[in-house]
Image (cartoon, rainbow, N blue to C red):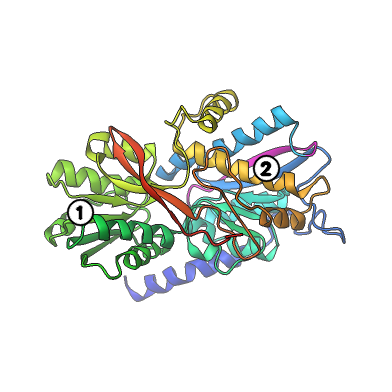
Amino acid sequence: MNATRLVAHRLRPLLLAAALLIPLGCASTEDDGGGGGGDRTGISDTEIKFGIHIPLSQSPAAAYAPIADGIRAYFDYINDSEGGVHGRKVTLISGDDHYNPSDTVEVVRKLVEQDKVFGIVGGLGEETHLSVWKYLEERKIPDLFISSGLSRWSDPVVPTRFGGNPVYMQEGEMLGQYIAKEHAGKKLGLLLQNNEFGYEGEEGIKRGLEGSDVEIVARETYESVQWDVTAQTQRLKNAGAEVIATYAIPPPAASLVKTAREVLNWDVPIIVTGVDATELFLELAGAENSEGIVSVLFGHQAHETDYPGVQEYLANLKQYAPQVPVSNLTLYGYIVGELTVEGLKRAGADITRESFVEALESIRKYQCSVCLQPVSFSEDDHRPFEIEVYVRVTDGKWMTFGEPLDFETTKD
């Protein structure tokens, strides 16, 4: 990268942040309901409005759109079965950001300044959400259950912001411990997305490996817009890696698997981030190629049809989002919707943004309908999923095994 491009690359996040300070058309930047009694923006006598930024088109990342469908399906279920929350319908407005940070800026500003949403829920992606997180924080807008596991979302704790995905460093530590135990003395190769997602996963894996005799012999990276990692996979094999761990989203992670199995005829053990523990990854990589791959999860899965919570999810998805395929992505969105509604219920009828945050912080050992382990929050803990279990691809499905690992911060 030459000097001019390097400067432009480093200035881009600052320019995006500065753009948030420029008025959007004639949109008002005043809160509707600041007042002495608390901020009630986004709330009427009949409705509570939330927004989400998520790719819906023009990007392979649009495969994650079902997260929004899952959230909306849970909201619609509550609206239909319970008349909403305290007599108000809960609604979700989706903004298509194409997985592009500059578009995320425009989408979120519109949701906040024109649509007047109560909060943002389930926003997807590292670079995308990094373009708006400070904007939301400064305006004290609830920024809920971000679909990303960066530690910075919840460390240090900001009253209005709650993490969503398990923290990559904690998850990575869990994967590192598995590698240390099951692949003792082996040479490890890493494939990492070239951003905080990959770096934090790598740090966690190294923590889990501490004291073991596993040696990291190769470290390959790829850019977030790159899907083909054939060259990186070849270099990992050439470096003598005997086991692979990857912090990559499903398309490049699947590319690694397909290259290893189909091109290189390389039956190397592969461990992947929980971001890949989805049907999307199995479809892209191929079920046969994926057999035996290990990851981690925090919730029940869509194929566990004997579990009552999954049965409820399947029935509600069929009724309220019949055009959306059943998947772990919609199930994740369903969990996010359920946690959001639980906070609204606890906040009471006279809800404000402030009382809603306090209500979420009061949640202790809440067993959501499809969570594997209870969820707890506090003033010092805004991480919902800190207990995970191992999963392995068996006969084309992610199946749990072993004992849960507990990183829960809130113990009381």
Which amino acid type corresponds to the residue marked 2 in the rendered image? Val
The residue tagged 2 is 341
**x and y, in percent, of residue 354 in the image:** 75, 58
Which residue in the rendered view is the most extreme toward the right? 36
The answer to which of 87 and 13 lies nearer the viewer is 87
**x and y, in percent, of residue 232 in the image:** 22, 56
**x and y, in percent, of residue 45 in the image:** 84, 40
Quadrant of the image containing the N terminus: bottom left
**x and y, in percent, of residue 288 in the image:** 23, 35
Instruction: Say which quarter of the image contains residue 155.
Output: bottom right
Within the magenta stretch, is there residue 173?
A: no
Which amino acid type corresponds to the residue marked 1 in the rendered image? Thr
Which residue in the rendered view is the most extreme toward the bottom? 3
Mark number, residue 161: none
Dot 1 alpha-carbon crowd within 10 angstroms: few under 14, some 14 to 19, many 20 or more: many
What whole-number distance in Å separates the C-alpha atoms at marks 1 and 2? 43 Å
The answer to which of 296 and 98 lies nearer the viewer is 296
Above or below, 303 relative to 205: above
The answer to which of 365 and 34 lies nearer the viewer is 365
Above or below, 222 relative to 292: below
Point 53% across, 38% down: residue: 370
The span shown in magenta is 86-99
Mark number, residue 233: 1
Point 20% across, 55% down: residue: 243
Left or right, 22 with reference to 332 = right
